[in-house]
Each structure stands twice: as C-alpha cells, then as structure tokens.
Image (cartoon, grey):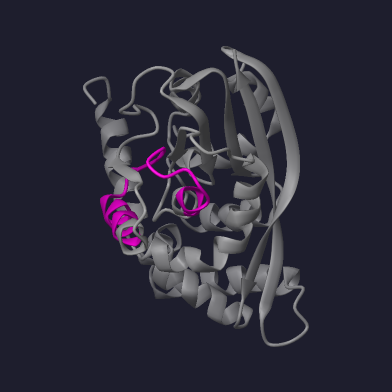
Amino acid sequence: MTDLSPEMQTLKTRLKSTWMAGDYGHFAQYLEPGALEFLARLNLTPGTRMLDVGCGAGQIAIPAARAGAPGRVTGVDIAANLIEQARARAAAEGLTVRFDEGDAEMLPYDDAAFDVVVSLIGAMFAPRPERVAAELVRVCRAGGRIVMANWTPGGFIGQMFKINSQHVPPPAFMPAPVLWGDEATVRERFREGIAELTLTRRFYPFKYPFGPAEVIEFYRTYYGPTQRAFAALDAEGQATLRRDLEALWATHNRATDSNTYIESEYLEVVAIRQ
C-alpha cells in the first residue's frame, strides 16, 4: 500500500475494521437464498477456476465448491475473521477451497488466473472503484467472465444506505458504493479490456422470521456498517436513526404476518474479457 495517501490508508483501515465488526457470517444466513440464485445463474462447469471477490464467510465460494468444483474455487476478502470463518466452514464440509485475506484493489493473483471472477455485493464497497475494475479484468482470462451483483441507488438497500449517510456522513472523497449499481457508471468503469457487457436489473429477497423492529436490532448487532453507524451517534442520534430505519423497513415490508419480507433491486453485471 505504498501508493496510498495518509487519508486513504486511514480510510482502508477503517473499512477493514467495519467489515470485521459484528458477525457477517451469522448475518448472511438470511441472505443465502438470494446468493444461491445468483450462483445458479453462473452455470459453472466442473474444473472452472472461480474467484469470489469480497467472499465474506464463503457464501458463494463454498456452495460453488460443493456443487462440483473442488480445488478450483478461491475466495478473497479484507476481513481476516471472515476468512477464518470461511476456512472453518469449508473444512467442516471436507471441501477444498482456498481463502485468502486480500484487497479487491490489489488482488494477490497472477494475470488471467481465473475463468470466472465474481463479486456478490462485495467489491462495490472498495473505495477506489477504478482500481477494482482494473483488477477484476486483470485476473480474468481472455474470454472469461466477470460477474457482479451491486445494489442500485434507487433500490431498497440503496435507500437504507442513504438514511445511514444522512445520520453519519461518509468520507467526501470516496465515491458512493451504489454507483456500481448505476448502468452508465459501470459502462465507464469497464470501458477497457471488455468485449461484451450485459447489465440486468434483478431483485434480491430479504426474509426474516421477525418484524421490522427486530430486523434493525439484528443489523445493529451483526452487520458491521450498521453497528458502526449506531456507535458513531449519541443516544438521541441513535434513536432517530432507529426510527428512520424502522419506518423504511415497515413501509416496504410485504409480509402479512409478524415476519419481514422485502426485495431490493440490484444490478447484475456480466462482462466478457477480451
């Protein structure tokens, strides 16, 4: 990281700490259905060399290996504790998956090392998107695929991020992560090294066996960004943030019982490497 300014170094340290807060492995259990839908559309064949960027606790990499690509799946994430969780999960299932601690802006792999490079709501959070795009292209072989799922600015999660930002403003020099869900922005970021680019808007299911108020507490306990947002506020600020988030979840809740069900729009990016 010798090319980092002091401000960027501080930001990266803070982002890593944020994603290591809470317990994303536990948090992601309710996200598994949408992750498996995303994985199914990849149509991976045996022997495919796949890299999962921002792999978390292995939500994509482990089922990919389970489905028939043992020893050919690699996951990378900045959060060391999530990498340890992923390794433990793979070992418990007897799966051979490589998990590395690493930065999406400086991937620790050779050029053209993978057939498919994926990122399910992961690489979009790195602070220098132009570096991320270049790295995703670099490690993908010619004719291979880069597949991302990124929250859109106008989708439900995009609205949730907007509320968080109103209460705890993000760094002014960091582009909004949800710009990875803007079609024009994605086309600009993948203007080099890509032979074909397909952008599709899809919806991700969020289903919880408890109501919106409990959802906010679940996020505050287990989801690092929400945990840190609350921690940055005084008691009055926390109460206001909770009120605004509960209102958002309650307004969009499609469940007719005591549970919570919403769908959030995301942009599926499929880029074919030149």
Q: Quadrant of the N terminus?
A: top left
Q: Nearer the viewer, residue 57 or 134?
A: 57
Q: Nearer the viewer, residue 6 or 186?
A: 186
Picture quadrant of residue 8: top left
Examine the structure image and report whether residue 73 is included in the region drawn in magenta.
yes
The residue most toward the left is 2
Residue range of the region highlighted in magenta in the rendering: 63-89
169 in relation to 214, above or below: above
210 in relation to 204, above or below: below
Report the residue at 35% width, 61% height from top: 89
Query: x, y (%) of residue 42?
Result: 63, 40
Report the residue at 73% width, 73% height from top: 253
- Say left or right for 169 vs 111: right
- Say left or right for 27 vs 17: right
Query: x, y (%) of residue 239?
Result: 49, 75
Q: Nearer the viewer, residue 198 or 22?
A: 198
Examine the structure image and report whether residue 106 is included in the region drawn in magenta.
no
Instruction: Let me know if residue 150 appears in the view.
Output: yes
Picture quadrant of residue 7: top left
Instruction: Let me know if residue 237 appears in the view.
Output: no
Q: Nearer the viewer, residue 231 or 140?
A: 140
Query: x, y (%) of residue 173?
Result: 44, 32
Report the residue at 58% width, 12% height from top: 192
- Say left or right for 263 vs 242: right
233 in relation to 178, above or below: below
Report the residue at 56% width, 62% height from top: 31
80 in relation to 113, above or below: below
